[in-house]
Amino acid sequence: MALAPVSAPLSTVDGFVKQFLQNLNFDIGVSLSASSRNDQYLALAGTVRDYLMARWLDDQRRQNDLQAKSVCYLSAEYLLGRQLDNNLLAARLTDIATDALAECGIRIDDLREMEVEPGLGNGGLGRLAACFVDSLATLGVPSIGYGIRYEYGIFRQTFVDGQQVEQPDAWLSLGSPWSFPHPEAAQQISFGGHTETYDDRGVTRSRWIPGWNVKAVPYNYMVPGYHNGRVNTLRLWRAVATDAFDLRIFNSGDYEEAVRAQTFAENISKVLYPEDSTPQGKELRLQQQYFFVAASIGDFLDNVLPGDFDLTNLPDRVIFQLNDTHPVIAVPELMRVLVDERGFEWDAAWAITQQCFAYTCHTLLPEALEVWSVDLLGRLLPRHLEIIYRINDDFLEEVRERFGDDELRIRNMSIIGEHPYRSVRMAYLATVAGAKVNGVAELHSQLLRDKVLHDFDEFFPEKFTNVTNGVTPRRFIRLANPTLAELITEALGAGWTVDLDRLRGLEAFAADPEFREKFAAVKAGNKRRLASVLHERDGLTVSDDHMLDVMVKRLHEYKRQMLKVLHIVTEYDKIVSGRATAADITPRTFIFGAKAAPGYAMAKRIIHLINAVGEVVNNDPLVEGRLKVLFPPNYNVTLAERVIPAADLSEQISLAGKEASGTGNMKFALNGALTVGTDDGANVEIRELVGDDNFFLFGMSEPEVEALWAKGYKPSDFYQSDDNLRSAMDLIASGAFSGGDRSVFEPILSNLLYDDRFMVLADYSSYIDAQARVDLAYADQDAWTRSAILNIARCGFFSSDRSIKDYIDRIWHTPPTL
Ligand code: 26W
């Protein structure tokens, strides 16, 4: 039976006011006059939630009835950003809510500011997962996102004397109106203990006798599709102590021990690991990984599938998409459930498992590929280790059959590595077990096949495919850039938000002077908006008449923030050395946003240097305010939504062959910034689409990088032979940015001169040339605007809707059920 249409009155201003006041009075327990902004925010969120609720329940029931094949997206990270505006937009409630609150004497903008974004991810991979759940709901694909409800998300970054200091992100402390805990649907998750064999009517079987367990409690988040009445579910797990465990200890009278045990259990979902490239091999992280995938698989089998389901047909009902290696322990977990708990023969279970997983790789850096020491894995998950060994034995047997006793090949392909210690290579396990393996941009997928997983590509070439990343146009155009969205709708009509290829229609408008003028006004408005945000948030000043040159992304040496620093110092150096006057320099504001992993010393030093350069350049009267370096702390999704629409120039300057895809690059292009970039990741595809005239390409290509390594790269040769470079580095070395202290940034400089793994010095002169072309192009504002519009018109391909359709066609085969 369909639910009563409780939502009907909510789609009127009067109905909305009533429900809002009702929530304020009865859920929050305050009168309007006594309510705080946070109370009002919570009541508003509750009202939006009420509106979506009927659809959500309806959807769950419909999906249940349909029994269609579902995607279970397994991701340790979801970098969601604020929910209020997104949910208002999806439900078409923005105007109604704005008016309703105005009737109550409340400015909705003030309430928007109350929301603390759930920062449950590090960077690109986590944000991609958030874009994907948005597209899955908008396209109407049966799907569940599974992950971890960290109590503390990515740290809040502050600067003290220019250096990064991390603060805990207590995002739940003022309430969490978007989620619903379901303690009754908890899963019990076990760890530790040992395995034993036993005789099952003449067959020897293994079983796991765990040492301890915790409860996984699901928190459900609504994921509304855009204007389609769909509401999908994101299910994030929280760890709590099991009752039995508690009781036993309480009864023994050891209160302290009971509290300790509880804390121990709850630690599992306490905090997001802030590393985003160098896995530390920490036990708690492996606990997190197993905790959430075991809960998710258990949930799907117990609660989503009907009770009498024959698991032989599991591949018809589900595909588990592994977002990088973080959830790969799901592979032996499904095998354990099938073999140990459901009585399947090994081969039958393996045949099922191999069809139920697919793996997305998000990196090319060898040090980012996760491995777990056999020691640790065997201690925490002894049965899983046995299963991994068996998978590996069977696999290597097949390799032998095909290639003979090629021991080198066998060693290279083994899921178990031996050096420097015995370990499980999670990427290899995922590749062997997965039906498909994909990279996240054309170049990246090619390099995976040619290099990182070359032997596997030879062994099963049909597994490998590409799905180029995408970003959701709902959040990154509609919400982030409402004036641009209006201009596009004015030009093209509605509909482009869910069919981004229609942006092509803007090509014709790029030639229209009136449209260009309107576009320029939109950009100028976005710059003013950013200026006011940065002023209020950080006391920073953005001048109206500067080019905004933006580099926002995690701080990592391969992304080469140092190349950007060297460009800035070169410009400054020209002025202080008298090689140029301020008047010769195109006025630019450089904006950085970047968090460094707390244990990544070099990255933190580079942050310090950026702040130090800003301090000097911004205050030197010789510069006459024509160069500004701004580094607002704590770059996050909320700030991204303000920075990206205001940008003129997007910095995508990683060493070719290192950035798997990038997704910031897409967001900037779709908001009409031009890119200065290397031939890396998805930059390659952006450039192909927008054309060379509308993209500033520089630097070595990936084959050129390889060739230079092969020949022998000597960074000091570049330092010696390039006067600008030498002078800029010497200026830093002189202590000019460190109060005369030459030691502060010395480690950065010697790293560049003697190590320079990411070839900053080799690409420097090409980068400086590209920036000169940028200046030249920017001098013709009208031509620049035309290029900006063409960037938007030609980048519709980068909608995450297209990515999801590619996943459906190439990997999932799960048609939408709209
Ligand atoms: C601690 C271990 C670890 C290692 C890698 C944690 C997280 C990672 C991620 C894979 C890092 C990441 O976010 N990768 C980025 O994924 C994006 C989405 O595909 C790509 O666009 C970026 O190029 C890639 O760096």
Image (tube, rainbow, N blue to C red):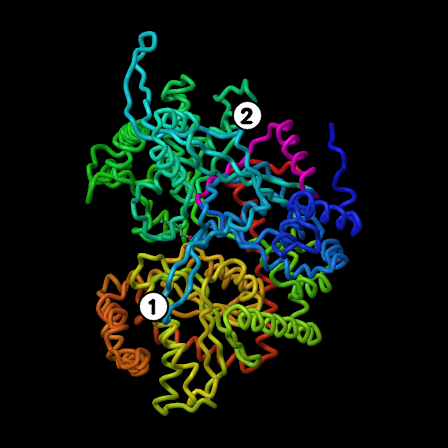
Q: Nearer the viewer, residue 27 or 314?
A: 27
In reply to whether residue 65 is colored magenta, the answer given is yes
State which quadrant residue 790 falls in.
bottom right
**SS category of the residue bearing label 1:** helix
Tell me where the magenta segment starts and ends, as one range. Answer: 51-76
> Mark 1 against mark 2, which lies toward the viewer?
1
Quadrant for the N terminus in the image = top right
Q: Which mark is residue 606?
A: 1
Q: Which amino acid is tagged 1? A: Ile
Residue 199, image x, y percentages: 30, 11
Specify the principal SS of the magenta part: helix
Question: According to the image, label 2 marks what residue?
Answer: 305
The residue depicted at 39 percent of the width and 42 percent of the height is 326
In 3D space, how far apart are the residues under numbered discs 1 and 2 (Cα atoms)? 51 Å
Q: Which mark is residue 118?
A: none
Quadrant for the C terminus in the image = top right
Residue 616, image x, y percentages: 38, 81
* Circle 2 Cα neighbour tier, 10 Å, few/some/many (<14 / 14–19 / ≥20): some
The residue depicted at 56 percent of the width and 31 percent of the height is 69
Q: Furthest residue to the front?
A: 253
Q: Which amino acid is tagged 2? A: Leu
